[in-house]
């Protein structure tokens, strides 16, 4: 039996005598480990649960959201948080509260975290952008201290 890997999913040939095309392949679980999970993995897991509960497949989700199946699949392993508009479209189609969806996607920091810590841990910004934001926060803090009695 031969194996091929396509887009993070193992495709296994069901019978080596079949012609070399995708109709003879079946998808198997990718086996993403906890350390390979992306920033938005909790949202991806929630999407999978909700569409299973609704009896939908990934094509139906794509039709209802206008978002490519690959984009939804990337939520499982991407190291970057998804765009807010993508999260909103998914949340609206699935009936998930937008704020909750943003939390699951890693777009909203945990409560109790400082702005400084959120910027430092963010995957949305480059190191240069992080330094610029942190410098601006320091300016605001200095200004606020100067104006407080």
Image (spheres, helix red, strand yellow):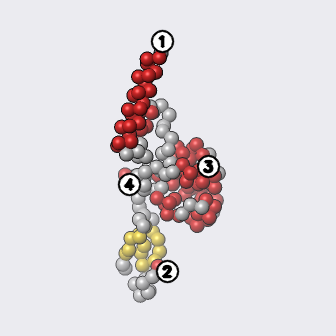
Q: Which residue has dot 4 on it?
A: 36
Of the two numbered discs 3 and 1 on the same chain, state the one appearing first in sequence. Answer: 3
Instruction: Give the quadrant of residue 140.
Output: top left
Residue displayed at 54% across by 57% down: 48
Q: Residue at x 62, y 46 (%)?
A: 97
Q: Which mark is residue 149?
A: 1
Helix, strand or loop at disc 3? Answer: loop
Given contact means CB atoms under 8 Å apart, are the residues at marks 3 and 2 in contact?
A: no
Within 10 Å of disc 2 (Cα), the crowding (few <14, some 14-19, many 20+) is: few
Of the numbered discs 4 and 2, the one sitting upstream in the chain is 2
Secondary structure beneath dot 1 equals loop
Earlier-in-chain disc, 4 versus 3: 4
Task: Read off the residue under disc 2.
Answer: 23
Q: Give the number of the mark in front: 1 or 4.
A: 1
Q: How many marks?
A: 4
Mark 2–mark 1 Cα distance, whole angstroms, equals 74 Å
Q: Is residue 132 above or below residue 88?
A: above
Q: Foreground: 77 or 49?
A: 77
**Any mark on residue 96, and which?**
3
Of residues 107 and 145, the one drawn nearer to the viewer in this rendering: 145
Q: Tag 2, which secondary structure?
A: helix
Distance, label 3 to label 1, CA atoms, is 45 Å
């Amino acid at each position: 039996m031969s194996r091929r890997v396509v887009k993070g999913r193992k495709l296994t040939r069901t019978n080596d005598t079949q012609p070399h095309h995708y109709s003879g392949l079946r998808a198997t679980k990718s086996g993403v480990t906890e350390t390979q999970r992306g920033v938005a993995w909790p949202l991806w897991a929630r999407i999978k649960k909700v569409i299973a509960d609704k009896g939908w497949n990934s094509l139906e989700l794509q039709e209802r959201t206008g978002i490519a199946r690959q984009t939804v699949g990337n939520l499982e392993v991407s190291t970057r948080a998804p765009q807010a508009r993508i999260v909103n479209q998914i949340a609206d189609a699935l009936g998930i509260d937008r704020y909750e969806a943003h939390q699951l996607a890693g777009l909203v920091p945990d409560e109790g975290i400082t702005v400084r810590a959120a910027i430092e841990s963010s995957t949305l910004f480059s190191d240069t952008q992080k330094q610029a934001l942190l410098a601006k926060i320091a300016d605001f803090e200095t200004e606020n201290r100067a104006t407080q009695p």
